Image: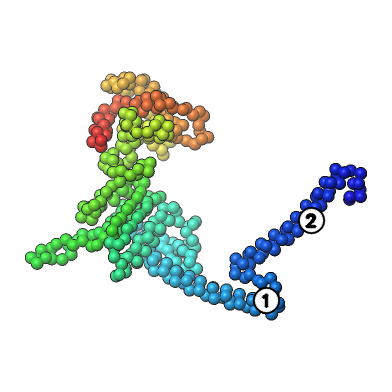
Amino acid sequence: RLQAARFDDKNAKTICERLFWKRFDNQGKTLADDARNKQKKKAAGLEIPDNIGGVSFFHFLKQSVQSIQTMLTQKGKERAIELSKLKNESKYVNEFLKRFCINNFTVSLEDDEEITIHYSGVPPKKGIQYSLSEGEKTALAFAYFLSKYRHEVLGDSQAKKEDFTIVIDDPVSSLDENRLFSTALVIQDVLLPQVMKKEKDQNDRWINKAWDGCKQIIILSHNIIFLKFMSNLINSDQCRDRADLYIEKGIISLLPNSLRNYQTSYFQKLEKIQAYVAGDIGHEHEKAKDYIPNYIRIVLEAFISFKFARLRGKDPFLPAMLDSLIGMITSDSTMFNGFVAVSGITDTQTLKTVLSEIKQKTNPESHGTTQDITHLEYLSEVELKRLAEQVLHVIQFLDQIHYQKAQELKQAAA
């Protein structure tokens, strides 16, 4: 090939360069493969000396096999201990599942460490990934936790409950509402200290004697209804130093009255809108614009849902939304005439104008997907504050008593 290219210096140099790098690559690959194989053997504990004869090599392999067999025997013993431990920890799981009102399946832990789901009338199913719903997985995980607690703490005469701190993180995630109360009951019965008439005093009178409880129990949840169930069950004898706390943007504070007294976040979001209008938010517009439009829409539509019980949505299976109220106003242009005027809202027509503007401004920020958005309006601080004021005026116009009581709630919290 060089002979054929003798009159073309440039082509000859290119061919020489390619041949040189090809030889270099082949040598480099061989060296790299040797180094990689040596490293693998070293990592596996099978490093072979560089200079080794046939007899020595056989002896080395024999020692390696014995070493691996010893290692496997030890791992087998450790596995058996862990499996036995898991079976003991999970022995009460099915009992707790029934207490959570879950009766359609039971579970067992087989020797292959695979969880088996047993449904009535059908063959058992291996694994939980495709056998259980997300709510059932949550219930199973919490049932295992309680079973482990019962085995390791309540079932151990040497264990002192007062040495334990228990943290329960959202035990009702994905559970339906019917099981929220049963879960709260189980926590109250199993984990909280019990007070009962246990013995009599010297005058033959019954005295309350408390069962020892844990040092501290912390329950976290996003579900307000579950926490209300929990709150109603816990009495002062069980938790004398109890505190109801609220975490917002990384800051822990006492639970506000707008959440303490009610089972939804409606009043809490209404309170946030009121605080924004009053200038009491405490942070700049750049943060407020990310959630205030959503709060405006949620509060107004929640108000509509219980203020206008017969209002129908476009879809019979969905609750009435803001456009439903606007549509009702369009069909009856006089239904709100004669109301007491509130800040420019004087009759049905002015109410419709304000509602239409709120719907237009808040719709992209709070509903639908990116495919639904045809335009996205940036809300300046002036516009957002005016929008927040308008939604308060709408609520005040449609129900002045409701608005007055919400204002009193804010003042009480302050």
Q: Position of residue 180 (x, y in %)?
A: 33, 51
* Up-down relation of residue 327 to residue 369 (above or below): above
Between 412 and 136, the one nearer to me in the picture: 412
Q: CA distance from mark 1 to mark 2?
A: 33 Å
Q: Is residue 398 left or right of residue 133?
A: left
Q: Is residue 386 left or right of residue 59?
A: left
Name the disc covering residue 48, or none: none
Mark 1 neighbour class, 10 Å CA radius: few under 14, some 14 to 19, many 20 or more: some
Mark 2 neighbour class, 10 Å CA radius: few under 14, some 14 to 19, many 20 or more: few
Q: Secondary structure at mark 2?
A: helix
Name the disc covering residue 23, or none: 2
- What amino acid type should be assigned to the residue bearing mark 2? Arg
Q: Position of residue 256 (x, y in %)?
A: 28, 40
Q: Is residue 18 left or right of residue 359?
A: right
Image quadrant assignment for residue 105: bottom left
Q: Report the residue at 89% width, 50% height from top.
A: 2
Q: Tell me the quadrant of the picture where the C terminus can be found.
A: top left
Q: Report the residue at 39% width, 31% height from top.
A: 284
Q: Report the residue at 37% width, 26% height from top.
A: 385
The answer, for residue 188, to whether it is visible in the render is yes
Q: Earlier in the sequence, mark 1 or mark 2?
A: 2
Between 100 and 169, the one nearer to me in the picture: 169
Residue corresponding to mark 1: 57
Q: Position of residue 198 (x, y in %)?
A: 18, 64
Q: Position of residue 393 (x, y in %)?
A: 32, 25
Between 135 and 29, the one nearer to me in the picture: 29
Q: Secondary structure at mark 1?
A: helix
- What amino acid type should be assigned to the residue bearing mark 1? Phe
